[in-house]
Image: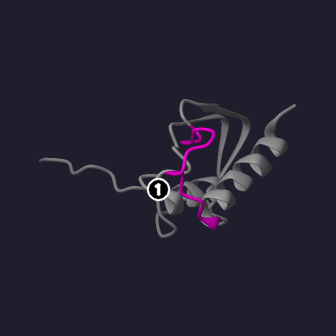
Amino acid sequence: MSSSPSPAPNADAPNYPADRTLRYRAVFISDLHLGSAQSRLSEIETFLRDVECDRLYLVGDILDAWVGSRTVRKKPAHANVLMALLRKASNTCT
């Protein structure tokens, strides 16, 4: 009998919290590259919305920008993710 991989958590799964919030002691977020065309904004926003943690660690390239660069994407969605990160960090840092 072969087993198939477990599906990703979703709201219909029996072990997924009803309020969609996942709770962790520590969360590490790395290499978001906010400001680049390759950043996955909707996935980042969903993750930040659905996760609560005691400690939030930002490592790697969070912002993808050089001072004076003209290639930085200045979309409101990038600023929204950055603000969500700052709100999450202010709620988790002690």
* Residue in the image at 71% along x and 55% along y: 84
* Left or right of residue 33: residue 93: right
Q: Is residue 69 above or below residue 49?
A: above
Mark 1 lies on a secondary structure that is loop
* Span of residues in magenta: 62-76
Instruction: Please state the horizontal and vertical placement of residue 4, each as a whole percent of the image.
Output: 22, 51
- Residue 36 is situated, as x and y percent measured from the top left of the image, at 48, 51
| Label 1 crowd bin: few (<14), some (14–19), many (20+), radius 10 Å | few
Say which residue appears at 26% left-offset and 49% top-offset.
Answer: 5
Task: Judge from the rendering whether residue 42 lies leftward or rightward of residue 5; answer left or right.
Answer: right
Placement of 14 over or under 6, stated as above or below: below
In this view, the residue in front, 49 or 82, is 82
In magenta stretch: residue 70: yes
Read off the residue under disc 1: 40
Q: Which one is nearer the viewer's eye here, 5 or 44?
A: 44
> In the rendered structure, which amino acid carries the disc numbered 1?
Arg
Quadrant showing the C terminus: top right
